[in-house]
Image: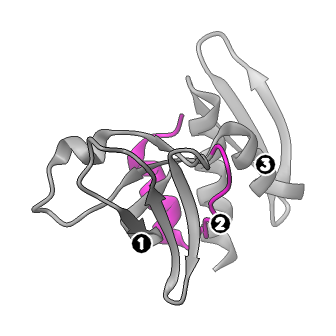
Amino acid sequence: MITRELAVALRDSGLVWHPAEGDRFQLDLPDEVEREAEAEVFTVSEMTIEARQTPSGTDLAFNGTTEWALDAVTLAEAVWLPREDQLRELLRGTFRALVRLEDAFRVEVEIGGDMIAFEHPDPSEAYGRALLELISRSH
């Protein structure tokens, strides 16, 4: 799983999230809310957390979760933690290879004719860093 810091960087760079069943996220709430709530990883699921369209946008509704004082949060109050397969899909035609190294993974992408590699012990993090570079270069 990618780090929260990388997820925030992806969101801030313009990555748009359309919540779907199985997506993971963390809360990004005002400072007065407990930090423990922000550390928890939630999963979109019809049974517990459902993405609902409202006139003001998309809300993530907490259905029947009695331990949380929240009924719903907006997408702006959530940080999407994309999975490895989602990150690879978002790289689209720029993705060239995933290479297993001795103690890490290397994701190779081609952006604007340049071959670029990103290494990390977690392949999701390497994919995420490659995606952040792709988004940065597309602006």
Towards the viewer: 24 or 120? 24
* In magenta stretch: residue 21: yes
Split into 4 quadrants, where in the image is the C terminus?
A: bottom right
**Element type where label 2 sits in the image:** loop
* Amino acid on which disc 2 is placed: His
Towards the viewer: 83 or 44? 44
**Which of the labelled discs sits on residue 76, or is there none?**
1
Q: Is residue 81 above or below residue 19?
A: above
- Residue 16 placement: quadrant: bottom right
* Amino acid on which disc 3 is placed: Val
**Residue that badge 2 annotates:** 18
Q: CA distance from mark 3 to mark 1?
A: 29 Å
**Residue that badge 3 annotates:** 109
Q: Going by the image, does 109 lie left or right of 105? A: right
Q: Is residue 79 above or below residue 98?
A: below
Disc 3 + disc 1, Cβ < 8 Å: no
Of the numbered discs 2 and 1, the one sitting upstream in the chain is: 2
- Please report the bounds of the magenta region as a residue range: 1-22
Mark 1 crowdedness (10 Å alpha carbons): few <14, some 14-19, many ≥20 = few
In the rendered image, the residue lying farthest to the bottom is 55
Q: Going by the image, does 79 lie left or right of 110? A: left
Image location of residue 66, percent across then percent down: 30, 44
Q: Going by the image, does 32 lie left or right of 60? A: left
